Amino acid sequence: MGARAAGRTLLTFLVLLYAVFLGAIAISGALLASKGSGPTTLAAVPAAVAALAIAVALVLGLRTPGSGVSRIRSGARLLGEAVGEALRFVRSPDPRLLGAVAWWAFDAAVLGAMLHAFGAAPSLLVFVFAYFVGQAGNTVPIPGAVSGGIVGVLLAFGVDADVALVSVLGYRCIAIWLPAPVGLVALTSLRKTLARWAVAA
């Protein structure tokens, strides 16, 4: 597999995964804004940005860019190919595509369990919106951006500050730190495997 094909395969995976992410923000934000539940601007702006990102991705997937700076055009073409490939996967009734939903659902379930355990009961729309908007903090190179984002949205929609904070901290401990020892063992095993491959080559 060439470098471009490998890049397209990885991008296709990311497109499928983050289509769920963007769709969840667009739908939950639009519904919250239309119902007037909580701060309308906070709900509407992320929903609009997510919808715009989906629209741009679909345009790239349905047409090939023909002009512009070479590097930008090449990147847009690669992304467009990945979106097109993702659309072909979506058109096929492949149950494995549910993995893109399950990946987010299982992670969000940890946060939901923490909120429930500490006595918070936000509506499903608020919960989904807070979780996914918080995950957008991954794009900010600042420690605690995800946790801060989730807590901030929960506070804006009326969840008690103490409960929101302890719930999110519990979620991050379970979702991030609990799997860390297993990850370290796997990393050690992977390094040994790569070393054996290098010797064999």
Image (spheres, helix red, strand yellow):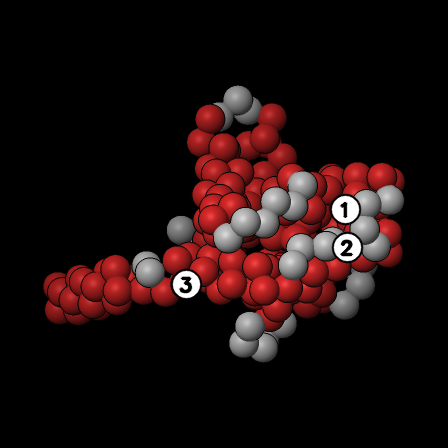
| Quarter occupied by residue 148 | bottom right
Q: Position of residue 23 (x, y in %)?
A: 68, 42
Q: Is residue 46 left or right of residue 11?
A: right
Instruction: Kindly identify the amino acid type of the residue bearing the numbered disc 2.
Output: Pro
Crowding near the residue tagged with mark 3, few <14, some 14–19, many ≥20 C-alpha atoms within 10 Å: few
Q: Residue at x 46, y 26 (%)?
A: 95
Q: Residue at x 60, y 26 (%)?
A: 91
User: Which comes sooner in the sequence, label 2 or label 1?
Assistant: 1
Q: Residue at x 44, y 31 (%)?
A: 96
Q: Residue at x 36, y 65 (%)?
A: 177
Name the front one of labels 1 and 3: 3
Q: Nearer the viewer, residue 96 or 67?
A: 96
Q: Single out the residue that lies furthest toward the bottom.
A: 142
Crowding near the residue tagged with mark 1, few <14, some 14–19, many ≥20 C-alpha atoms within 10 Å: many
Instruction: Kindly identify the amino acid type of the residue bearing the numbered disc 3.
Output: Cys
Q: CA distance from mark 3 to mark 2?
A: 26 Å
Secondary structure type for disc 3: helix
Q: Position of residue 46 (x, y in %)?
A: 77, 55
| Quarter occupied by residue 176 | bottom left
Q: Which residue carries the number 1 mark?
A: 29
Looking at the picture, does residue 56 appear above or below residue 123? below
Q: Which residue carries the number 2 mark?
A: 46
Secondary structure type for disc 2: helix
User: Which comes sooner in the sequence, label 3 or label 2?
Assistant: 2
Pointers 2 and 1 in contact (C-beta within 8 Å): yes
Name the front one of labels 3 and 2: 3
Q: Quadrant of the C terminus?
A: bottom left
Residue 173 numbered mark, or none: 3
Instruction: Kindly identify the amino acid type of the residue bearing the numbered disc 1.
Output: Gly
| Quarter occupied by residue 146 | bottom right
